[in-house]
Image (cartoon, rainbow, N blue to C red):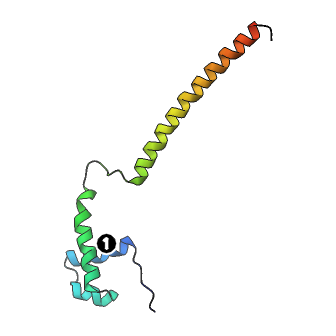
Amino acid sequence: MAKRRTFNPEFKARVVIEELTGAKTTAEICREHQLRAQIFSRWKTELLKRAPEIFSTQPSRGDEQQRIAELERMVGRLTMELEAAKKASNILTSHLSRNGR
């Protein structure tokens, strides 16, 4: 059974750009890199579909950005809880010291 080849995103972009700029034809690229035309076509469609994201003014919030925002909210909440606990501790220790305990 043949092992499937994997291609990194930089390679995919480079070969699609070669075709888009007219440096090579689809057939030349597929022969040179031993690719099926359907795979190359899928890469080209994906690149063209996602190209507007490069020029967007607001970066898209991916899973990582959502996770960061969630963690920042959690840190804020825990900081507030810690401050409240410190105040409560100070109040309790001051009451205990006044009562002579």
Which residue is rendered at x = 42% and y = 84% of the image? 4
Label 1: state its secondary structure: helix
Q: Position of residue 20 (x, y in %)?
A: 20, 75
Residue 43 vertical placement versus 37 (above, below) = above
**Image position of 26 with respect to 48: above or below:** below
- Residue plotted at (71% across, 16% down): 93
Q: Residues within 10 Å of mark 1 (few under 14, many from 20)?
A: some
Most extreme residue toward the right is: 101
- Picture coordinates of residue 49, whole percent (x, y): 23, 65
Rendering quarter of residue 36: bottom left
Q: Which amino acid does label 1 sit on?
A: Ala
Asked which quadrant contains residue 45, the reply is: bottom left
In the image, taking residue 62 as reference, residue 29 lies left or right, namely: left
Q: Which residue reaches farthest bottom?
A: 1
Residue found at x 39% / y 77% = 7
Expressed as whole percent of the image width and height from the top left, the position of residue 42 reads 26, 76
For the residue pair 1 and 49, the one nearer the viewer reads as 1
Circle count: 1
Residue 55: x percent and y percent?
Answer: 25, 55
Q: Which residue lies under the disc numbered 1?
A: 13
The structure residue drawn at horizontal position 26% and vertical position 69%, both measured from the top left corner, is: 46
Q: Which of 56 and 71 is in front in this view?
A: 71
Residue nearest the viewer, comparing 51 with 19: 51
